[in-house]
Image (cartoon, helix red, strand yellow):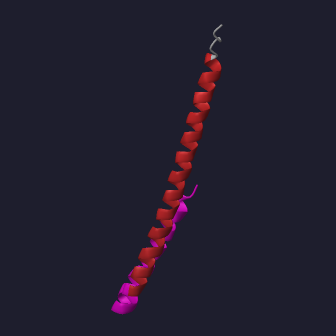
Amino acid sequence: MARKPNYRFARLERERSKAARKAERAKLKAERAEQRRREKSGEPAEVEAADGAAAGLANGGEAAASDSDRAGDEDTALP
C-alpha cells in the first residue's frame, strides 16, 4: 500500500532549506563586503600617504582630510 504524502512536512523542509541557503548567501555577502571595506580603506590610505610624502605638505594635508572623511563614512555605515 502506498504511503500518504505529508505535504505540510515537505513544505516545512523546503522552507528550512531555503532559509538556510538564504542565510549562507547573506553571510558570504557580508564577508565579501567587509573584505572590500578593509581593502578600500587600507589601499588608498597607503597610496595617498605616499603621494603626500612625495609631493609635499599640501597633498599630505589633502590626504589627511580624505582619511578623516572616510572615517566619518565608516561611522555612519555601522548600525
Query: Vertical placement of 13 versus 67: above or below?
Result: above
Residue 33 x/y as whole percent: 49, 58
Reply yes or no: does residue 5 show up in magenta. no
Residue 65 x/y as whole percent: 43, 77
Q: Which residue is drawn at 65% across and 22% down?
A: 9
Q: Which residue is drawn at 51% across and 64% down?
A: 74
Q: Is residue 39 left or right of residue 8?
A: left
Reply yes or no: does residue 69 show up in magenta. yes
In the rendered image, is residue 54 in sight?
Answer: yes
Q: Is residue 51 left or right of residue 20?
A: left
Quadrant of the rendering where the C terminus is positioned: bottom right
Residue 49 x/y as whole percent: 43, 84
In this rendered view, identify the residue nearer to me: 61 or 39: 39
Q: In the rendered picture of this protein, how many numbered marks are placed on residues?
A: 0
Q: Give the range drawn in magenta.
A: 51-79
In this rendered view, identify the residue nearer to me: 10 or 55: 10
Q: In this view, does 20 lie to the left or right of 49?
A: right
Residue 7 x/y as whole percent: 61, 17
In this rendered view, identify the residue nearer to me: 58 or 33: 33
Q: Residue at x 63, y 26 (%)?
A: 12
Q: Residue at x 58, y 29 (%)?
A: 14
Check the image and name the residue furthest to the front.
1
Quadrant of the rendering where the N terminus is positioned: top right
Query: Vertical placement of 10 versus 36: above or below?
Result: above
Query: Vertical placement of 66 versus 37: above or below?
Result: below
In the rendered image, is residue 56 in sight?
Answer: no
Picture quadrant of residue 48: bottom left
Check the image and name the residue furthest to the left.
55
Query: Vertical placement of 25 versus 15: above or below?
Result: below
**Magenta residues: mostly which secondary structure?**
helix
